[in-house]
Amino acid sequence: MATPLPDVNSVKVKALRTFAEKFGEQASICVYAPGRVNLIGEHTDYNDGFVLPMALPMITLIVGKSHSGNKTRILSLSNAVGATNEFEFEAGCRSDLKPGEPKWANYIKGCIANFICDVPAFNAVIVSTVPAGSGLSSSAALEVATYTFLETLSGKKPEKPEQKALACQKAEHDFAGVPCGIMDQFISSMGKEGCALLLDCRDLVTKQIPMLHLDNYAFLITNSNAPHKLSSSAYCERRDCCYEAAKLLGKKSLRDANMNDILVLTSQNASDHVVKRARHVVAEIQRTLDGAVALEKGDFQQFGRLMNESHNSLRDDYEVSSKELDSLVSAAREIDGVLGSRLTGAGFGGCTVTLLRKDAVDRAIQHIKAKYLGTPAFYIATPFGGAREISVN
């Protein structure tokens, strides 16, 4: 069976109870931000392409309250944060903040440093239901939840919603040292219930894609529980191949290329790696646009086919799959009622996402469990809303 997810209220109750026990008073602020699954459009973001994520009912929730002292104190109940789950630092000028230990706290400090104004000292408790290291964006959920908390604490918000996402991305770049794209922060900030989000990574224009006819279908997320093995050097190698391909073609980015340009690269004697990486990106950008159209029409058969093509391309041309992910995808595709299955996220570990009929969910889970050598976890994904403040009552 799929793992049931705690609802927002039960997570809130746990956080509020812990806050009262730890700090001896009631919290006055409660916010959350969701994780995400990318339905299609992998490794297109840094090529100015399109992505199509949806927010998940897996959240990072923060409760807290400002005080008149000088120390900000934060306690995390998440298993993801490692041995040190509590830290404090001097409140004051946000420009004085610097990254350090524990590493998980850098996401929070980075958001404070990139907030639009200084904030008073505060106490806070964090609880997360987003599995860490799974490719479902626990880091962006933490960043966006933190920024939303700071908005509520200060009463200040940026003029445009994309400024919030960009500030969170900068926090991850500068404080966590992760050169992430913009997708995760956008969907965690702007997710809408019942919709996927088509994001143009060049000009940051978004379009909500309603999934009105999803009643008989579901997205099944399968966590391989194999941690990401995509090293920064492997990631950079693929990114650099894309940049080299664009340069050889005289393009600003592979967003401006088409499949005829792949033949041009071959005629220019570009390396096999450059050709393959470029071919994936050019095809994946088009698949993402076609996928958004298919979802809007309720053509889930077509969307499933595009998911299959995406995984095959990530496996063969971009070479970011793994034996664990291939095994999960292969097993899922053997089940009648499965329309499509693919790895989601950067690859080399993490999760797969499978589109299937609801009456095939239990069958698919049992079959995958029987075929997969590891111990996978399963979640039924429904399109969830983005970050928000909720009542503490």
Image (cartoon, helix red, strand yellow):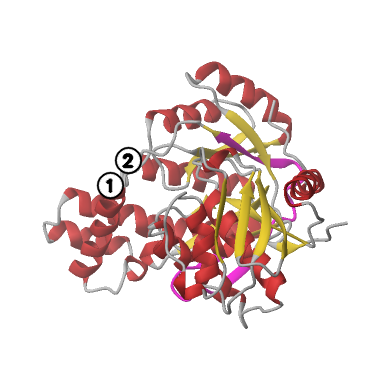
Q: Residue furthest bottom?
A: 159
Name which residue type carries label 1.
Answer: Ala
Distance between mark 1 and mark 2 Cα atoms: 15 Å
Q: Is residue 46 visible?
A: yes
| Magenta residues (range) | 197-222
Residue 234 disc label: 1
Q: Which residue is labeled 2 in the image? A: 316
Mark 1 surroundings: few (<14), some (14-19) or many (≥20) residues within 10 A: few
* Quadrant of the image containing the C terminus: bottom right
Q: Which residue does the image show at 49% across and 41% down from the upper left?
A: 133
* Quadrant of the image containing the N terminus: top right
Q: Is residue 96 magenta?
A: no
Q: Which residue does the image show at 43% across and 42% down from the upper left?
A: 311
Residue 185 spot, x, y in % from top left: 55, 62
Residue 25 spot, x, y in % from top left: 81, 55
**Which callout, 1 or 2, points at the residue further toward the start of the chain?**
1
Total labels drawn: 2
Secondary structure of the residue carrying numbered label 2: helix
Q: Which residue does the image show at 18% across and 67% down from the upper left?
A: 248
Instruction: State yes or no: discs 1 and 2 in contact (Cβ < 8 Å).
Output: no
Q: Quadrant of residue 260?
A: bottom left
Residue 74 spot, x, y in % from top left: 62, 54
Name which residue type carries label 2.
Answer: Asp
Question: Residue 134 or 2: which is nearer the viewer?
Answer: 134
Above or below — where is 61 with respect to 293? Answer: above
Q: Residue furthest right?
A: 393
Secondary structure of the residue carrying numbered label 1: helix
